[in-house]
Amino acid sequence: MKNYPLVSVVIPYYKKKFFFEKTISSILNQSYKNFEIILIYDDNNLEELDFLKNIKKKFKNVRLIINKKNLGPGLSRNKGILLSKGTYIAFCDADDIWKKNKLNLQIEFMKKHHLNFSHTSYFVIDREGKKIGKFKTKSKMEYRDLLKSCDIGLSTVIVKKNLLRKNLFCNLQTKEDFYLWLQIIKKEKKIFSVNKYLSYWRYLENSLSSSISQKLLDAFRLYYNYEKKNFFTSVYYVLRLSYYAFIKKLNIYKTHG
C-alpha cells in the first residue's frame, strides 16, 4: 500500500441502528487503510449510544462525538470536519454503503488529476439492501450545471480539507449538501466525477430527504437566502430543480420492477 495521506470519514448518526453495521463494515474493510472515522451521535435519545460505543471500543481508528443537543446532519458534519485530522474529508450517511475500493480509486483519481474535490456514480438500494436503480454522474460540471440539478451523491464525495476552511454545510434540513457543493464549484470552477459506481445510496420512503414539501421549501431558501437570487428567479430555479429531480428519479428507477 502506498503512503497515502490520512482520510477523515465523517458520519452523522441519527436512529440508523438497523443499517449501520453494514455501513461501518463497508468503510472498515476498505482496501485503502489510512483513514479515521468520525461518528457524530446526533440524537437526544441516548438509546443507541451504547451500540456505537461498542463499535468504538473495537476499532482504534473510530472516534465518537456526542452532540449535547440535536443539530441536524449539516451542522453535525461541520463539527466532524473541524475535529478531523485528515488531509482529505470523505462523507458517508449512516445507512449508505461503500464498495471496498472506493477510497483507493478515488484518492488515486484526485492525486493523478490534482483535484480538490471529486464524487462518483452510485447504485440505489432499498431498505433491505436490494439494488433498485443507479445514477451515472457527468464526468465534469460547472456552476450553471449544478445550479439547475444537484447531481452529487453526498456519500460519494471526497474533498481536500483545506477547501473547507471557509466553506461548510449550512443549516438547512435537506439541501445543506447542495449548498456546500455550490460554494465549492464557484471556487473550483469545475468539479469532476470518477466514472465508476463506488457507493450504494439507500432510498427510504419515510426519510427526511424524501419529503417533497421540505425539499421544495429548502430549495427556495437555498436559492433566495444563500445564493441571493431574487424571488422570481428563485421560484424558477426551484421549479427547474424539481423537474430535473423528477427526470433523474425516472432514470434511476427505470430498471426497477
Image (cartoon, rainbow, N blue to C red):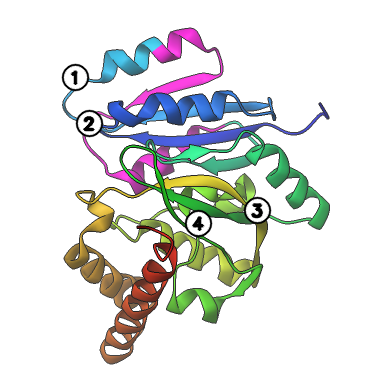
Q: Earlier in the sequence, mark 2 or mark 4?
A: 2
Give the residue number, with chain letter if any, for mark 1: 47
20 is higher (above) or lower (below) than 131: above
Distance, label 4 to label 1, CA atoms, is: 33 Å
Q: Earlier in the sequence, mark 4 or mark 1?
A: 1
Give the residue number, with chain letter if any, for mark 3: 196
Q: Secondary structure at mark 2?
A: loop
Residue under the point 23% across and 49% down: 207
Kindly report which numbered mark, 4 or 1, lies closer to the viewer in this rendering: 1
- In-front residue for pair 115/241: 241
3 is higher (above) or lower (below) than 188: above
Percent position of residue 133, x then y: 44, 56
Distance, label 2 to label 4, CA atoms, is: 25 Å
Residue under the point 42% across and 57% down: 177
Horizontal arrangement in the rendering, residue 120 relative to residue 23 (left or right) = right
Badge 3: how crowded within 10 Å, few (<14), some, or many (20+)?
some
Label 2 close to label 1 by CB (< 8 Å): yes
Give the residue number, with chain letter if any, for mark 4: 167
Label 2 close to label 4 by CB (< 8 Å): no
Kindly report which numbered mark, 2 or 3, lies closer to the viewer in this rendering: 3
Q: Which circle marks residue 100 in the picture?
A: none
The magenta region covers 55-84
Q: Earlier in the sequence, mark 2 or mark 3?
A: 2
Horizontal arrangement in the rendering, residue 201 relative to residue 122 (left or right) = left
Q: Residue furthest front?
A: 257
Badge 1: how crowded within 10 Å, few (<14), some, or many (20+)?
few
Identity of the amino acid at label 1?
Glu
Residue under the point 39% across and 62% down: 253
Q: Secondary structure at mark 1?
A: loop
Give the residue number, with chain letter if any, for mark 2: 43
Q: Earlier in the sequence, mark 3 or mark 1?
A: 1
